[in-house]
Amino acid sequence: MKAVARPGGGGCRIGSAADFDGWIAERPAAELTEPFTFVVGTDGVLRLAPRRSEHVACAGGDVVPSAGEISFVREADRWTVGEVSNQSTGYCPDVTSWPAVAHALDGVELGRPSGFTHEFVFRRCPDCQQHNIVREDDFACVFCGRDLPRTWNVDPTV
């Protein structure tokens, strides 16, 4: 994956509440109306980038425990997470990656939901190897029609 990321690239590392406050203060108002791209690194730290950024680029090409899209809302005198999903077709993280996201958000002292507000179920077809988004509990490959596994099987290291 590092081959697709530019050297020195990557999202902004948000390791503390002060990091987040500085980062969010620099965002133009129009940018705050859309979700942001996020990844959680293997170090447990949140990285953020503009929405149209690729997750792999946001992560600097590294393997990550979770990735998706996130939006923030101002409530009273603090920022909280409005919505958060595991929508990343670059990493296809499982819905069980939520604890990594929760831990990273707690480390930044952001109010958050109890889980992904929008969950995406990703599976790799064992026959044609294509990545699929499972919709309406239909575990069939949209490319070749083969049954998809019920358990997550999208591993970027395979």
Image: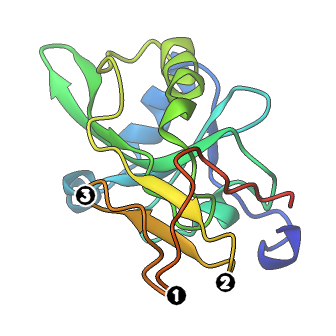
Which mark is first along the chain, 3 or 2?
A: 3
Disc ID at residue 128 = 2
Coordinates of residue 82 in the picture (x, y in percent): 22, 34
Which mark is first along the chain, 2 or 1?
A: 2
Badge 1 vs badge 2, beta-carbon distance below 8 Å: yes
Q: Secondary structure at mark 3?
A: loop
Q: Amino acid at mark 2?
A: Cys
- Cα distance, mark 1 to mark 2? 7 Å
- Cα distance, mark 2 to mark 3? 34 Å
Disc ID at residue 105 = none
Number of numbered markers: 3
Disc ID at residue 144 = 1
Q: Nearer the viewer, residue 106 or 9?
A: 106
Disc ID at residue 34 = 3
Q: Secondary structure at mark 2?
A: loop
- Cα distance, mark 1 to mark 3? 34 Å
- Left or right: where 147 falls relative to 77: right
- Left or right: where 102 falls relative to 16: left
Relative to 106, say whether 15 is above or below: below
Residue ID at (14%, 20%)? 75
Quadrant of residue 57 in the image?
bottom right
**Is residue 100 visible from the viewing direction of this image?**
yes
Relative to 110, say whether 65 is above or below: below
Q: Secondary structure at mark 1?
A: loop
Which mark is first along the chain, 3 or 1?
A: 3
Residue ID at (45%, 12%)? 109
Residue ID at (61%, 79%)? 130
